[in-house]
């Protein structure tokens, strides 16, 4: 864990981090004088320009002790935004996770030119970087207490404490999402996912309903059942509800829907071996929804009623597995022709969307690691956003910008709709064309949404999980989406 505190006596630790804007080296002269150490000569000789994420480190002698000074570039001031600040400050604490000789105490001197609205992102970044998944390692990472002193004059101690507390609450959710997605599939089954929801529901203003086989069949949620029936680990449908006990006006009712495929082999339309690897992360949408509810335990926002809906299944090629050419009739009564059993996420989400319709929600947002096609279109850093409502779309894009998480709107192109028309059912679960795969998947989901309900779909297949070190975030789950959704709830 990390303990953040505001430096009040101007005494910094022996390990010092100084974020610097491009062209801002001259502004460090007074800092050099205040610290009583000489570093500018070395810094300029190293040709450090403070380009974004550029780093330089020196050991200097001051008052008979050695100080390790680490500079990190923030890039040009006009390009400094939430994403850059979040990543730069994440890299500070992540460097301590990676270091074999980690200090127990470090100090950070905030640039005086940093905008106040970016301080939140900087503090959140420090919490973000101090994470790795070592549960199954014999040799554990060093997670002993790390004290981080912040030298910042632009906010009061009270404001600092408020920002830190909020960041702690948010990252209780983000890190739960990471833990769940990183967990191996033999332990994170649909039942295990449901148990996590039940644990969250022990908190104030949160309740949980779990539907097992009997309830799923009784409610005719056959989209969920048919996809999951090939596995020995039976499906579960999870319904979490948060409702503020303090409300000055009518609460807006919002559904957050997360795809909960705890492992995806592709079913009978079996994936190649290389493509099956990392498919434990196919419940990334569900992990995000649970992370949001974990954060809601402490944040307790007012004037909002949030429903978290998770269809939790394993997609396995068992003897009872659903098959290509099957016709699935789910909760909505609409029929789905199964073209490809590896297009299972949209099938289970169709039941969750209809469940949300029946709740008469005011807005509906689903998150899913839905298509590789979205990664082809946008890469693996950006989520694809689809929406039937401009106001909701704008809120989500604003929320993502506020969090430094990248989303990009993609169209619901009517000219592609005919590619999911079926000759034997109401709709096909896989399009007749390989082009625009992320769009046709979103249009499949839209087919089940009540036309009166503002709805958005976020395809998080790219940014939800990384398999290589990026220098600011541990490999594995990124917790993408949790912070954006919390911002969205605050904007609602």
Image (cartoon, grey):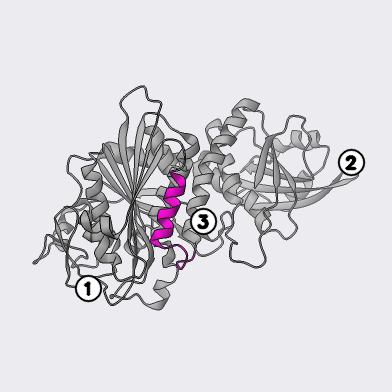
Q: CA distance from mark 3 to mark 1?
A: 32 Å
Q: Nearer the viewer, residue 70 or 277?
A: 277
What residue does disc 3 label?
A: 179
Q: CA distance from mark 2 to mark 3?
A: 44 Å
Q: Position of residue 422 (x, y in %)?
A: 12, 64
Q: Which mark is residue 120?
A: none
Q: Is residue 185 magenta?
A: yes
Q: Which residues are magenta?
A: 184-201
Whether the residues at callouts 2 and 3 have beta carbons within 8 Å, the answer is no
Label 1 residue SS: loop
Residue that badge 2 annotates: 63
Choose the circle earlier in sequence order: 3 or 1. 3
Q: Residue furthest front?
A: 214
Mark 2 lies on a secondary structure that is loop
Instruction: Locate residue 295, reporting x and y percent.
Output: 48, 41
Q: Residues within 10 Å of mark 2 (few under 14, many from 20)?
A: few
Q: Nearer the viewer, mark 2 or mark 3?
A: 3
Q: Is residue 212 left or right of residue 184?
A: left
Instruction: Kindly report the distance in space between the C-alpha atoms of the residues bearing marks 2 and 1.
Output: 74 Å
Question: Seen in the image, is 349 located left or right of residue 108?
Answer: left
**For residue 136, what is the image quadrant?**
bottom right
Q: Which residue is mark 1?
A: 323
User: Magenta residues: mostly which secondary structure?
Assistant: helix
Give the farthest residue toward the left: 423
Q: Is residue 464 above or below residue 62?
A: below
Q: Is residue 373 magenta?
A: no
């Amino acid at each position: 864990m990390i303990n953040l505190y505001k430096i009040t006596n101007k005494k910094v630790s022996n390990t010092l981090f100084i974020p610097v804007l491009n062209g801002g080296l001259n502004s460090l002269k007074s800092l050099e004088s205040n610290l009583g150490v000489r570093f500018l000569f070395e810094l300029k000789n190293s040709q450090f320009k403070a380009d974004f994420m550029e780093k330089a480190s020196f050991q200097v002698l001051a008052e008979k002790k050695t100080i390790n000074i680490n500079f990190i570039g923030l890039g040009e001031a006009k390009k400094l935004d939430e994403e850059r600040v979040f990543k730069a400050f994440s890299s500070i604490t992540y460097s301590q996770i990676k270091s074999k000789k980690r200090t127990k105490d470090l100090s950070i001197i905030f640039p005086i030119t940093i905008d106040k609205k970016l301080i939140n992102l900087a503090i959140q970044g420090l919490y973000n970087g101090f994470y790795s998944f070592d549960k199954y390692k014999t040799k554990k990472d060093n997670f002993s207490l790390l004290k981080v002193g912040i030298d910042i004059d632009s906010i009061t101690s009270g404001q600092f404490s408020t920002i830190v507390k909020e960041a702690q609450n948010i990252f209780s959710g983000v890190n739960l999402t990471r833990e769940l997605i990183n967990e191996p599939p033999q332990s994170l089954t649909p039942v295990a996912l449901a148990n996590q929801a039940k644990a969250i529901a022990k908190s104030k203003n949160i309740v949980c309903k779990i539907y097992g086989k009997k309830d799923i069949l009784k409610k005719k949620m056959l989209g969920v059942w048919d996809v999951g029936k090939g596995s020995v680990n039976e499906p579960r449908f999870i319904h979490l509800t948060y409702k503020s006990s303090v409300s000055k006006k009518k609460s807006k009712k919002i559904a957050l829907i997360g795809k909960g495929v705890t492992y995806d082999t592709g079913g009978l339309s079996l994936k190649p071996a290389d493509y099956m690897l990392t498919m434990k992360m196919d419940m990334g949408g569900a992990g995000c929804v649970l992370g949001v509810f974990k954060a809601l335990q402490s944040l307790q926002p007012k004037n909002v009623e949030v429903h978290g809906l998770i269809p939790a299944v394993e997609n396995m090629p068992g003897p009872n597995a659903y098959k290509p050419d099957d016709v699935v009739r789910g909760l909505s009564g609409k029929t789905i022709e199964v073209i490809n059993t590896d297009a299972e996420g949209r099938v289970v989400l169709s039941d969750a969307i209809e469940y949300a319709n029946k709740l008469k929600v005011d807005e509906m947002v689903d998150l899913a690691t839905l298509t590789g096609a979205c990664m082809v279109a946008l890469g693996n850093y950006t989520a694809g956003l689809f929406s039937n409502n401009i106001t909701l779309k704008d809120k989500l894009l604003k929320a993502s910008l506020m969090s430094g998480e990248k989303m990009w709107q993609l169209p619901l192109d009517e000219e592609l709709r005919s590619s999911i028309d079926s000759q034997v059912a109401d709709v096909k679960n896989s399009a007749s064309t390989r082009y625009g795969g992320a769009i046709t998947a979103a249009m499949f989901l839209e087919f089940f949404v009540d036309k009166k309900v503002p709805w958005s779909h976020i395809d998080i297949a790219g940014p939800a999980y990384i398999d290589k070190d990026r220098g600011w975030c541990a490999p594995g789950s990124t917790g993408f989406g949790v912070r954006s959704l919390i911002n969205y709830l605050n904007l609602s």
